[in-house]
Image: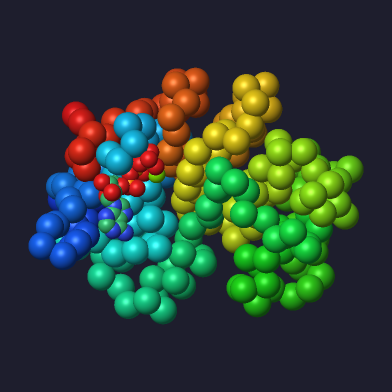
Amino acid sequence: MQNQKNIVELRNLCKHYQMGDTTVKALQNVNMAVAGGEMVAVMGPSGSGKSTMLNLLGCLDRPTTGTYWLDGADVSQLEDNLLSEMRCHKIGFIFQSYNLIAQLNVVENIEVPLFYRGCSESESRNRAIELATLVGLEKRLWHQPSQLSGGERQRVGIARSMANQPVLLLADEPTGNLDSKTGRDILKLLKKLHAGGATLIVVTHDEKVGAECERIFQMADGRLKT
Ligand SMILES: Nc1ncnc2c1ncn2[C@@H]1O[C@H](COP(=O)(O)OP(=O)(O)OP(=O)(O)O)[C@@H](O)[C@H]1O
Ligand SMILES: [Mg+2]
C-alpha cells in the first residue's frame, strides 16, 4: 500500500509507445515518492523521458503498466472523464511558454480553471485578484498578455496554476524562456509557494533551479537514476 504522507507515489511505472514494429520505452520501471510540501526537480538529457513523466503525473496520459497514486487514489487506469476530473481538481500546471489566452486579461486568465469548476463570478473574481496580488501583479490586473513582460506572463501562469488549490503543482521548464535575473525572480516565487505548503515537481535543465529544490531526480533512458 502507499504511504499516506505521499502526494505522489509511482510504483514500477512504464510507458511504452508502439511505433510500427518498434517499441519506444519512454519510461521503464520508475519508482518515485514525493511527500506533501516537498519541492523536487526532475532533470536529465533530452529524450530521457521527463515530459512523458510529467504527462503521466499530470493525468494527461496513462502508464502502460505500473501504479500511480495521486493524493491517496490509484489513478493509473482511470477512464478519460475521471482522469480529466483528477487533473481539474488536483493538478496545477506551469508551462515554459505560459500558455495564456491572448484575448483575456490577467484576472480573466487566472479565472479560467475556476470557470471550469463552476465557481460563482464574484467568488472567482475575488480569488483571481487575491492570487494576482500574491504573485506581485496587483498593478497589472487588467493588462492583456501582450502588455506584459515575460516574467509577468509567467507570474500569471503561476497564479492560474494555483487557482483550484491543487494538491500538486507541475512545472515544465518554468524559467526556460526567461533571462537569468527574471528566472531567479520566478524561482523565488515558486519557493514562496513551497514555503506556503505547496507540493512542486519542476522539470528543468537549469542547474540553479535544481539546486534550489530539496531533491533532484535524475533521469536517463527512461529510468530514474538512484
Ligand atoms: N507520443 C510519442 N510516441 C512515440 N515516442 C514518443 C512519444 N513521446 C515521446 N516519445 C519518445 O520517448 C522518449 C522520451 O521522450 P520525452 O519527450 O519524455 O523526453 P524529454 O526528457 O522530455 O526530452 P526533452 O528534454 O528534449 O524535452 C523519446 O525517445 C521520445 O522520442
Ligand atoms: Mg520534454
Residue at the far front: name it: 20
Q: Position of residue 105 (x, y in %)?
A: 81, 58
Q: Name the residue rendered at 41%, 57% in the picture.
A: 58
Let me know if residue 135 appears in the view.
Answer: no
Q: Position of residue 174 (x, y in %)?
A: 55, 39
Residue 216, quarter of picture = top left
Let me know if residue 156 appears in the view.
Answer: yes
Does residue 192 appear left or right of residue 105 in this picture?
left
Q: Name the residue rendered at 66%, 42% in the picture.
A: 154
Q: Name the residue rendered at 71%, 44% in the picture.
A: 153
Say if 172 sits above or below 226 in the image: below
**According to the image, what is the colour scheme of the structure?**
rainbow
Front-most of residues 80 and 119: 80
Q: Name the residue rendered at 17%, 51% in the picture.
A: 25
Splitting the image into four quadrants, where does ligand 2 fall? top left
The quadrant of the picture occupied by the C terminus is top left
Say if 223 sits above or below 10 in the image: above
Front-most of residues 31 and 204: 204
